[in-house]
Image (cartoon, coloured by chain):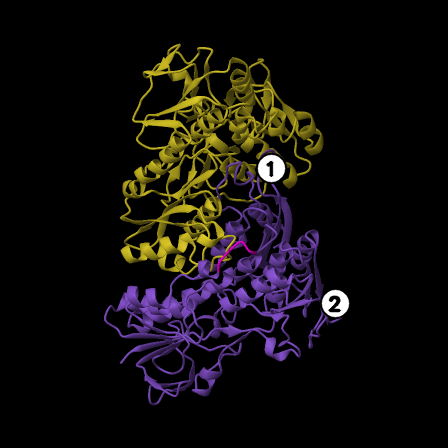
Chain colours: A yellow, B purple
Amino acid sequence: MALVVIGGVAAGMSAAARARRIDPKLEIVVLEKGPVISYGACGLPYLVEGRVREARELIAYTPEKFSKDRNVDVRTGTRVIAISHPRRELVLDSGARLGYEKLILATGARGGKARIAGADLPHVFSLHTLEDGERMRRFVRERKPKHAVVIGAGYIGVEVADALRRNGLKVTILERSEYALLREDAAFTKEVRAQLEKHGVELRTGIAVSAIEAAQVAGVPCDMVVVSAGFQPNVELAAEAGIQLGRTGAIRTDERMETNLRGVFAAGDCAECTHLVTGRPTWIPLGTTANKMGRVAGACAAGARERFPGIVGTSIVGIFGMGFATTGLSVAEARAEGFTPVAARIEALSRPRYYQGARTVVELIADRATGRLIGGSVTGEDGAAGRINTIAAALTARMKIDEFEQLDLAYSPPFSPVWDPLLIAAQQLRKEV
Amino acid sequence: MALVVIGGVAAGMSAAARARRIDPKLEIVVLEKGPVISYGACGLPYLVEGRVREARELIAYTPEKFSKDRNVDVRTGTRVIAISHPRRELVLDSGARLGYEKLILATGARGGKARIAGADLPHVFSLHTLEDGERMRRFVRERKPKHAVVIGAGYIGVEVADALRRNGLKVTILERSEYALLREDAAFTKEVRAQLEKHGVELRTGIAVSAIEAAQVAGVPCDMVVVSAGFQPNVELAAEAGIQLGRTGAIRTDERMETNLRGVFAAGDCAECTHLVTGRPTWIPLGTTANKMGRVAGACAAGARERFPGIVGTSIVGIFGMGFATTGLSVAEARAEGFTPVAARIEALSRPRYYQGARTVVELIADRATGRLIGGSVTGEDGAAGRINTIAAALTARMKIDEFEQLDLAYSPPFSPVWDPLLIAAQQLRKEV
């Protein structure tokens, strides 16, 4: 009897590694449908850019090494086509059957390429797997396309646009919504657009693409297309096995990452988790969350008692050297969740003027009724990651704005001005609450 | 009747500005003994280095501009020699008397130069005022000293050593204690020492200096000496007026920054405040704390009700491009405060290897009895400030290690590895608790 993990990338490999650490004797099998495991999918845009020179730099473990170091049976090229939970058995695409005692679903997510007509044309790409990245890199190097259209202004879409632009292509991003980076925030989108345009990338919002043609998409001439939109969790296998999905469409779990079927866990991009600001389930597929979920699922499947409390929705994207970071809810999102948000957005320097400070934009959002911080965003060339993480810690702690305003943040001219931009934003916000 | 502020640098000017904002009609007088106000004393090492080319770049406001913009009577070159609280009257060095209704003491701190024999020799410097900075810069440029001894390995001492070394001097730091940067932490001191030595600065600890000679200090030959040790709060004026000092030797106040004399407030380097980890009074003179205290003192003196809860003891220093940051208590300090500390110190990369991550050292310290985080340190070429601020927010929120371990921190290859060094340290620490 064994623990079987379906999926060998972020969540799956974290789960397998953690389960092994908890129980040195447990039989563990990882089934991965692709040819490689344990790769840093978030590094793919930098492979396209050329900063990462070889795909293998993105691979943390080969199946052989992981198998040997961790004593885990890793089977690549193995697809699961059905789960029979009453029989505790998986059906593989080879027709073989594999029994399990505990099961972890780490089946990930996929893009919306399949739903766009013409997406199978040879100049159309997506960027999920190492093979996708290598294929795109090869196309850029060998075919020297001139004008790329990127469909979707989410994290990967914007990162790919940056990478292609650095390779000399003209790049146009087409985004269905009015917003970039999945943040319902017009001012933040304006900052993103300004940075993209400054570096020669056009962002067109409110453009729904239903078809790709040989030489144009939605009227934009192009000889290369990247589809980075329409992401959805891979839940079909789970749903057919009677595993409950949540209102987000991803697999529902408890804090131990266990699904409604006892002994069956889910982790990573196929699963939802709790948003700690709203207290409700959310689906925000990101590598760091996938790894955390995987770790907890692996621990619990191996018999430990751990919990994954949830996320506050933190993210950051680098666009031509500038960080664009968000956490918690935007004003619009907060309103939709039933808060009465009040916000302050300020511009300040990241360091003193005499120490070459650069423009930083900080927005903080609080709930008027309670004064509790519920969201924020930070944009800037330096310090954006650290500043958003400070807000993320405050959100997790349910900190109020008057407490946040007095935070004892590190000050020294090479790192920050005497009033950190976070504190300036907090002072401004407290006036509004 | 008026609000009088004694001291026109960080705390004093923050107080005056804030009081004006609270009460547009209040009569406000600022008395500053020196010739300039409102300068960034923390920028002085960068003036010595030459990165800041002119002293005036460090001045936020001239007396004229502040007086005009804020309608505040700013008097430079004015020293207060006595406070008669029963008469609500100050005695100035000119012999004149000045009445007050509310008084804010922002008299700052001073170094220990006066207590070292030979400290009045012409090649001996300290670095508190703009004049000090200009004088040191001039000496370095014109006299071209070859070998400097810096007495004291605190923040300013180490920053001055960096600045002088960048000007080509051989530099030796002599520190009385066994520790650098005021942190009772041998491993942290080892990191500081390694970075200094890598750049040609020698750090000798356990060396008490009582005298400076013309060509040597404690056996180290030199033609320039900087005294950056023995700091103490300027409290004589307050003490003589019957204002209570705390156990730290600095002025004791309540959360509104009010002293034991009603209507008399104290703020900045002359005052103590609460350490939020220990709950006890502490004296950690830093510019950012001074400004925060000043703001609250100014608001309360002008009739508002605000409070300054305290600090967690966060600091950061840049040494040859690397950040050395601490917050809360070290293991030794925690033990002395009655905690049973348990710590984990890890080395990790600041970003993925494929994105040129640099070595980062993180230590996290928790109280074994409660699991509560009580301190941390971060060393690294990038992200040290943001990471220490994230810990500082957690300390302020009295977060426990298992909650910190699950923090939703921003992840993207240009900014962090998928497991941020903070989370790796937290995972390690949780095993120990």
Residue B155 seen by the camera: yes
Q: Tell me which amino acid carries mark 2.
A: Val
Vertical order, A17 against B290 (above or below): above
- The quadrant in which the N terminus of chain A is found is top right
**Disc 2 is attached to a residue of which chain?**
B
Mark identifier at residue B220: 2
Vertical order, A378 against B92 (above or below): above
Vertical order, B170 against A126 (above or below): below
**Disc 1 is attached to a residue of which chain?**
B
Helix, strand or loop for the magenta stretch, by majority? loop
Q: Tell me which amino acid carries mark 1.
A: Gln
Residue B329 locus on image (x, y percent): 57, 63
Left or right, residue A64 beside residue B230: right
For residue B334, which quarter of the picture?
bottom right
Left or right, residue A265 beside residue A432: right
Q: Relative to the observer, which residue lies in front, B110 or A215?
A: B110
- Graded by Cα atoms within 10 Å as few (under 14), some (14 to 19) or many (20 or more), the crowding at tag 1 reads some
- The quadrant in which the C terminus of chain A is found is bottom left
Asked whether disc 1 touches disc 2, contact meaning CB atoms under 8 Å apart, the reply is no
- In the picture as drawn, the residue positioned furthest to the right comes out as B219
For residue B144, which quarter of the picture?
bottom right
- In the picture as drawn, the residue positioned furthest to the left comes out as B25
For residue B433, which quarter of the picture?
bottom right
Residue A267 locus on image (x, y percent): 50, 34
Mark identifier at residue B356: 1
Asked which secondary structure carries label 2, the reply is strand
- Magenta-tinted stretch: B50-54
Q: Relative to the observer, which residue lies in front, A142 or B42?
A: B42
Rendered residue at 50%/39% (across/down): B411
